Image: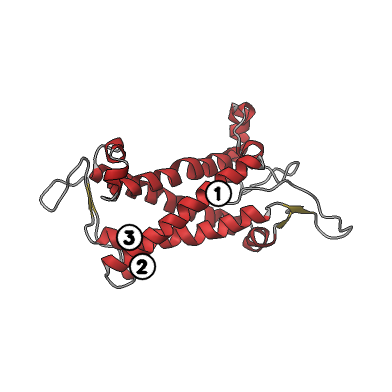
């Protein structure tokens, strides 16, 4: 994910225009989040391999009807690569804490520096039919930036970032907490919020699958938009405006 910092142009008189697109706070959060989510997905797939069936409700076991049953995921997408439920849980729970605290700090910081209000707020004009058609056409033609406002996000970028930051990641955290028996004493209502522990497990898996889909689409668009330029901007903050 690539939320933007307040833009400022480079003073260099020659060469392509450059924009200071990502501040240090955004870049640090991006890379922490990238590593955390990848490790959590890989370790979560190993945990799922222990019982690769999903149910709705409070209970679910071998002889119950599952709404989804998948083959076990191969070793090269799981952490660890050899079957170990205990080690996978250690990885998963540790990085779940990293994800939760990093997300909380990011949300607070983004409200303070007005990044959310300035860059991710979906305005009425963004939802107009003409605007939606223009953004859709630009994406279809692999033009991801408005030449007049290259630092601005289009509607689809805003929707995807807002959906991940404010819907999918909080849903992953809450459904993950509902799966922990230790939370029953502290927050007994949390499991009921999802309709039972097995429902929480299903919601957790669906949110993980949607997050994985976002990562695949995000990386694909980064490659299409120019991977060197995009990755450099998330490392240094500076982004070259395409010709």
Would you call the spot at circle 1 few (<14 residues within 10 Å), some (14-19), or many (20 or more)?
few
Does dot 3 land on a helix, a strand or a loop? helix
> Depth-wise, is mark 2 or mark 1 nearer the camera?
1
Residue closest to the far left: 63
Where residue 70 appears, as percent x and y from the top left, is 25, 55
Residue of label 2: 79
Verify CB contact (< 8 Å) between mark 2 and mark 3: yes
Where residue 75 appears, as percent x and y from the top left, is 32, 70
**43 horizontally vs 196: left or right:** right
**Of callouts 2 and 3, the N-terminal one:** 3
Does dot 2 land on a helix, a strand or a loop? loop
**117 horizontally vs 15: left or right:** left
Cα distance, mark 2 to mark 3?
Answer: 8 Å
Does dot 1 land on a helix, a strand or a loop? helix
Residue of label 3: 45
Q: Residue at x 70, y 43 (%)?
A: 146
In depth, the one of 146 and 158 nearer the eye is: 158
Q: Residue at x 37, y 59 (%)?
A: 93
Residue of label 1: 105
Where residue 214 appears, as percent x and y from the top left, is 47, 50
In depth, the one of 177 and 61 nearer the eye is: 177
Cα distance, mark 2 to mark 1?
Answer: 27 Å
Instruction: Please determine whether, in this image, residue 82 is positioned above or below residue 135.
Output: below
């Amino acid at each position: 994910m690539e939320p933007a910092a307040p833009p400022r142009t480079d003073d260099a008189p020659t060469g392509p225009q450059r924009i200071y697109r990502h501040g240090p706070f955004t870049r640090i959060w991006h890379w922490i989040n990238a590593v955390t989510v990848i490790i959590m997905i890989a370790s979560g797939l190993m945990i799922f391999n222990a019982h690769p069936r999903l149910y709705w409700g409070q209970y679910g076991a071998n002889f119950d009807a599952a709404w989804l049953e998948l083959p076990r995921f191969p070793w090269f997408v799981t952490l660890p690569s050899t079957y170990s439920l205990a080690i996978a849980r250690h990885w998963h729970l540790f990085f779940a804490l990293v994800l939760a605290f990093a997300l909380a700090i990011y949300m607070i910081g983004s409200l303070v520096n007005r990044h959310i209000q300035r860059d991710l707020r979906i305005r009425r004009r963004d939802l107009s039919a003409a605007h939606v058609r223009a953004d859709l056409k630009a994406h279809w033609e692999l033009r991801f930036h408005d030449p007049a406002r290259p630092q601005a996000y289009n509607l689809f970028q805003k929707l995807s970032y807002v959906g991940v930051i404010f819907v999918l990641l909080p849903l992953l955290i809450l459904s993950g907490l509902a799966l922990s028996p230790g939370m029953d004493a502290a927050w007994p209502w949390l499991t009921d919020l999802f309709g039972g522990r097995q429902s929480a497990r299903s919601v957790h898996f669906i949110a993980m699958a949607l997050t994985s889909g976002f990562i695949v689409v995000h990386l694909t668009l980064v490659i299409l938009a120019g991977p060197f330029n995009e990755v450099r901007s998330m490392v240094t903050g500076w982004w070259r405006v395409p010709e």
